[in-house]
Image (cartoon, rainbow, N blue to C red):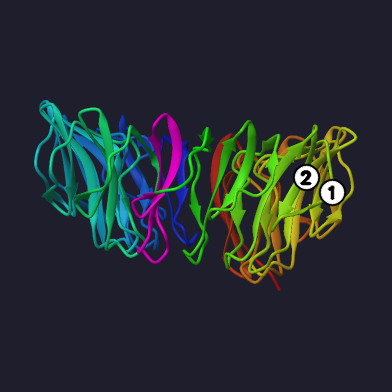
Amino acid sequence: MVDSIREDSIIFSPNGKHVAYLARADDKRFVVLDGILGRKLDDVADHSLTFSRDSLHFAYAAKEAAKWFVVVDGSSGPEFDRIANEGIKFGGDGGRFAYIAGTGKKWLAVIDGKPGPEFDVIAGSTLGFSSDGRRVAYAAKKGMNWLVVNDGKLDREYDDIGAGSVRFDNSGNHLAYGARSGKRWCVVEDGVPGPEWEGVIGSTIRFNTQGDSLIYSALKGGKLVVVRDGKPGPENEGIGLEYPIFSPDGQHIAYVATRGGKMHAVHDDDPGVGYDAILAGSLQFNSDGKCLAYAAATNGRWFVVINGKRGPEFEGIANNTLRFYPNDCRAMYGAIRDGKQLIVSDGNIGPQYDGIVQGSIVISEDGKRLAYVAVKGKSDVAVIDGEEGREFDCLIEGSHPIFSPDGRHVAYGVYKGNFVFVVADGKFGPSYQGVNVEPTFTSSNCLEYLADKSESGTLSLYHVTHRFR
């Protein structure tokens, strides 16, 4: 018998076929996985419930008799005084897992259930697998020095390791990170220190898709430079923190730089035209790397530039809306004109609204359909392929329209009056008090979500499946 359910703990597996959450009964906590109650425990760490990327494995951190341990696929691991807040990380297809635990004053990384060497500090944000799950690395502090542990092997010690700088390439064959010795910084690639700089921006270290080229931003003589394979480019007064970036084919780089008081979208070594401003985070390549786009401003007027060609001018371009259609040089974005907001798709300017809901713009995987949510007076409305649906109060928290994998169906969760509904292909579904997990397409013809409804004073939880004909 369950006394209560912690609603913010409910999670679906990535494929939408499994659901887990925390519950309480008789002053004990336990995990419910696919409706099956787990063992009763003294405690379960908040937000520790985790599915692997392939949805085949499940883990959480638990406490019993003053000791913490991690449960993976129902099996309990070794006991510790504490488990770090960074939680459990699965690698690759989920067959491997890692987490950070503490005993006494020491910390250690547990890889596949086996505790590693003890350290004074482990930087939890650095613990991670290569994309294929073969390799794992993290940064740790031993005495006064820092080092990177790479597949259990300790690299040489440095005075510091750059925050957020430990990076594998896509193949998992190469590892790089920023390190400091004395007052000089370098990037260490596969254990070999590169040229020294006054500083290295650790978050900018990245390999190209093929893993045969490495870029980052560094400080040289008081100026910022982009370094590619150890060779510095032109000096700049500033470089955006999210840059440089590689094109998807790994052959080209781009970044936003300030030179002579103007902002430039630098494509390889070509600085292009200088503008008064370039919208942060807008610079991007399309999927084949042949097109480069960004939002810029001159004399107070904003526009989007694609391969050097300026689009129509507006009062503003909305943050985080510029994107290419899949496998295409066509782009869409949100803009402001006459105090109203609108969507521009492939150069076509859409109708004006009181607002466009942030994060609601979605393109189907095949690039043929577009959906977003607009504000009309006191109500919201979903606009699917240019057609408005029924009005509602607002989207459920964190939600946005989603297309089925084949692009034929679209769904989203909304509030209307005192109830919550899931709208599928424009039709409102049953009413609920809440939708605990946003709708997910588990196939092109199947939509699933978790909702609750109060019946006769009892809160009931429903796993809802909607099948399209």
215 sits left or right of 270 in the view: left
455 sits left or right of 382 in the view: left
264 sits left or right of 120 in the view: right
Q: Element type at marker 1?
A: loop
Q: Position of residue 326 (x, y in %)?
A: 64, 66
Q: Position of residue 171 (x, y in %)?
A: 33, 65
- Disc nearer the start of the sequence (2/1): 2
Q: Main secondary structure of the magenta part?
A: strand
Q: Is residue 141 above or below residue 95?
A: above
Q: Amino acid at mark 2?
A: Phe
Q: Position of residue 418 (x, y in %)?
A: 73, 35
Decide whether residue 249 is among the magenta residues.
Answer: no
Q: Element type at marker 2?
A: strand
* Crowding near the residue tagged with mark 1, few <14, some 14–19, many ≥20 C-alpha atoms within 10 Å: few
Q: Which residues are magenta?
A: 206-231
Q: Position of residue 444 (x, y in %)?
A: 62, 70
Tell me if I can see residue 59 in this picture.
no
Q: Is residue 124 above or below residue 349?
A: above
Residue at 35%, 39% in the rendered image: 164
Residue at 78%, 45% in the rendered image: 303
Q: Nearer the viewer, residue 408 or 42?
A: 408
Residue 211: which quarter of the image? bottom left
Q: Quadrant of the N terminus?
A: top left
Q: Amino acid at mark 1?
A: Pro
Q: Quadrant of the C terminus?
A: bottom right
Disc 2 and disc 1 in contact, CB within 8 angstroms: yes
Q: Is residue 303 above or below residue 146?
A: below
Residue 312 marker: 1
Q: Nearer the viewer, residue 237 or 374?
A: 237
In the picture of the structure, the residue carrying the numbered disc 2 is 303
Tell me if I can see residue 150 in this picture.
yes
